[in-house]
Amino acid sequence: MFRTVLIANRGEIARRIAGTLRVMGIRSVAVFSEADRGALHTRAADDALPIGAPEPGASYLRAEALLEAARRAGADAIHPGYGFLAENAAFAAAVEAAGLTFIGPTPEQVRTLGDKRSARALAERAGVPVVPGAEGADPAALQRAAKSLGLPVIVKAAFGGGGKGMQVVEREEDLGAALDSARRLAVSAFGDATLYLEKRLERARHVEVQIFGDGRGGAIHLFERDCTLQRRHQKVVEESPSPVLDERRRRALTDAAVALAREARYRGAGTAEFLLAPDGRFYFLEINTRLQVEHPVTEAVTGLDLVRLQLEVAAGGALPLRQEDVVRRGHAIEARLYAEDAAHGFLPQAGRAERVRWPSAPFVRVDAGIESGDAVPVHYDPILAKVIASGADRTAAIERLAAALDDTLVHGVITNLPFLRALARSREVAEGRFDTEWVEREFLAGFSALAMAPAPELALAAAALAERLLVAPGGTGRTGAEAVPDPFTTLGRWRLPGLG
Ligand code: ADP
């Protein structure tokens, strides 16, 4: 096993990885940009090294700085977490060239599966259905393809990720403009202009399968996660198991994922993503070659530590368990807490989280990147924490999640808590009746109106209270909207029917 692991990331995921390293008796070394000096993830690790200026390109995305830190730390492996360089094949190769272990798949696998077109080709070889689509550089050919696929289609960047750069085209005459703007975005966000088309599946659900491979053709799955609750193609709430799969379909889906992993001779942890159509058919979307944000729901229902499994596969080259050793039990659900203003277009927020209170309750786990007094820099993804609740069944898990979110407080930075609380208590979520666009199409319409119009006297009272709570020793106190506690907490039982 490794002696020292460098964690090439920040925030909640860096802290999460440090937690497992501690349990395993492996020395953890964090890295930090100037904006993250003293951050929670650096306090959670055994050591921490500076890697540069706040901008991601000057720190967390700088391969040489990370390798230099690994050398200084005497690390024998690097865990990339998610985001940043986690799916960068050149980084994976550079880590291996430096004689260190990259905790992830081979650089070649990162490259092949990072290109959604070659991933689709792999799925076809493995006999797994893909979303009907078309590729090619010629706009006229794409135009014809869109017509034969049938509109609406989605224009995607071949190397895209994070729900970015996808354009839905409803009318044939809009395709040209969509291709142009998607191409520009693909170049600026992913450094590659390659696009392709997919037919848009209507009222689909997002269901993904956690896989682990040994790199030699052996692979297992750790069941599925349902990540259908999304906003702008980005996951908001994830759960396991999926509320809509029966055992037969679950089996078909997990078999397909394992077939993909085998075909790729996949090494380490990965996620095969699928869209599930209303008729029960599923279609391969892509493979993510890293630990996912939502991995804790899988941990909650399987009792397995996914970071530990990653380390064991990376160090030993074999899977530490067989398929029949993976047993699923109960239900788990996760909500992503972001520093963003749900009432104002989910605008990302930054500042200092003067006071933070994480929930503490049975069957509740919090993976947090901040504590009271910590900074939330403007430079990075605004994820602050994940709240995960589990239970014997789905209803119990959702009830615990809703209560845990009520118990969560973040003062000093606006968060999406009001949105999450309302979501966790909505009837459709309770009934499992939603598709990937339901949040935007239906839920948010009712939500923002209320969140943007709190009673004026309430806002004043809240501001006064916040003022009292937030006066730091020797400080000046804070005023204004950023200090106003959200109405969903303060209203107590006086919530509007249907939303509370
Ligand atoms: P990214 O890699 O940017 O995350 P994905 O291809 O994984 O993009 O898709 C992200 C989300 O976008 C999906 O979960 C789904 O909600 C939506 N989506 C993607 N492709 C389609 C499609 N062909 N039809 C309908 N929705 C889609």
Image (spheres, rainbow, N blue to C red):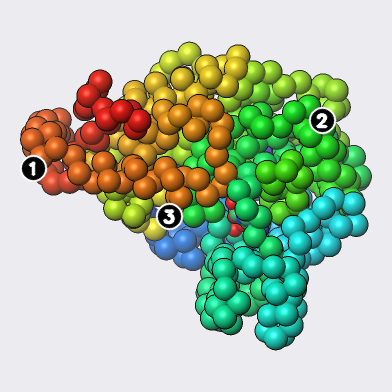
Quadrant holding ligand 1? bottom right
Which amino acid type corresponds to the residue marked 1 in the rendered image?
Thr
Residue 380, numbered label: 3
Q: Residue at x 89, y 52 (%)?
A: 126
Report whether residue 42 is seen: no
Which amino acid type corresponds to the residue marked 2 in the rendered image?
Arg
Q: Residue at x 69, y 73 (%)?
A: 146
Which amino acid type corresponds to the residue marked 3 in the rendered image?
Tyr
- First of labels 2, 3 by sequence position: 2
> What distance separates the C-alpha of mark 2 from that of mark 1?
61 Å
* SS category of the residue bearing label 1: loop
Report whether residue 500 is seen: yes
| Badge nearest the viewer, 2 or 1 | 2
Q: Position of residue 495 (x, y in %)?
A: 26, 27
- First of labels 3, 1 by sequence position: 3
- Which quadrant would the N terminus be assigned to in this image? top right
| Residue closer to the observer: 331 or 319 | 331
> What distance separates the C-alpha of mark 2 from that of mark 3?
41 Å
Q: Residue at x 9, y 32 (%)?
A: 461
- Which quadrant would the C terminus be assigned to in this image? top left
| Residue closer to the observer: 52 or 164 | 164
- The residue at which mark 1 appears reads as 476
Q: Are marks 3 and 1 in contact (CB under 8 Å)?
A: no
Residue 325, numbered label: none
Q: Position of residue 2 (x, y in %)?
A: 71, 37
| CA neighbours of label 3 inside 10 A, class few (<14), some (14 to 19), many (20+) | some
Mark 1 Cβ inside 8 Å of ligand 1? no
| Image: 39 above or below 170 | above
Q: Position of residue 448 (x, y in %)?
A: 31, 46
- The residue at which mark 2 appears reads as 248
| CA neighbours of label 1 inside 10 A, class few (<14), some (14 to 19), many (20+) | few
